Amino acid sequence: MPLSIRMVPSSIKSLGTLWRLRRFRWIAVLSALAYWLAFLFAIQDLTVHARVGPVALTLADRAWELMFQPRGPFHFEPIALLQLPFLTWTFAPLNAATGAVLAALVGLNISLAWLAVSRPRACRARPAAGILAALPGLLAGSACCGPVLFIVLGLPISASVIGLFGMLVPAAVVLLVLALLFNLRRVDAQSALA
């Protein structure tokens, strides 16, 4: 059966049933958190440094206007700077939200991969589909600095290829949603609870 919009309600119902599994929830939440942090590091909103100092929070003037200014494709200006010992977070709400959406999808796909491995009778899913779909999202961090890296390294890559970096975030969302729907339709959620 090919993927279609009609399968979304049944997939949501299956996901709700699977969410009752404590280990499924833990794997989804922890892998989503790890992915979200990796995404923020990749786009350099989170950075590690050797400075040990007091905790400081600085808010930008005109934060509402600044929040929507793009730095690059799907990469926005920060509105706050949080400095912690060994860690600095330039908080851009739209970057954090983009990372959270990707992270939630990655977490659910990784949980389904765990289900496919741990309960093969209940799950005819293909764990690799969801995990491979997460790669464009993590590579989306290179959407802002990838072109610069190519220029610095002197790699002969045409402008058309560099322009594709901006499509990594939407590609990741589409691939993750498709992988999630594909795998959810193959899961027998009720037998997974048993």
Image: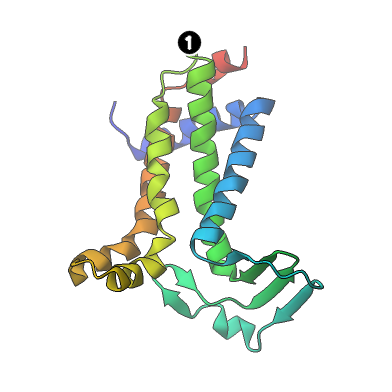
**Residue 179 picture quarter:** top left
Q: Disc 1 designates what residue?
A: 121
Q: Where is residue 85 shown, x and y percent of the image?
A: 75, 65
Residue in the foreground of this view, choosing between 125 and 39: 39
Q: Is residue 56 above or below residue 124?
A: below
Q: Where is residue 164 shown, x and y percent of the image?
A: 27, 63
Q: Answer with left or right where residue 183 lies relative to residue 15.
A: left
**In the rendered structure, which amino acid carries the disc numbered 1?**
Arg
Q: Answer with left or right where residue 52 lies relative to residue 92.
A: right
Q: Where is residue 149 shown, x and y percent of the image?
A: 34, 68
**Residue 176 picture quarter:** top left
Residue depicted at 41% across the width and 58% down the height:
140
Q: Secondary structure at mark 1?
A: loop
Residue depicted at 66% across the width and 76% down the height:
80
Is residue 40 visible in the rendered image? The answer is yes
Colouring: rainbow
Q: Where is residue 157 shown, x and y percent of the image?
A: 19, 66
Residue in the foreground of this view, choosing between 106 and 193: 106
- The quadrant of the picture occupied by the C terminus is top right
- The quadrant of the picture occupied by the N terminus is top left
Residue depicted at 39% across the width and 62% down the height:
142
Q: Is residue 104 above or below residue 82?
A: above
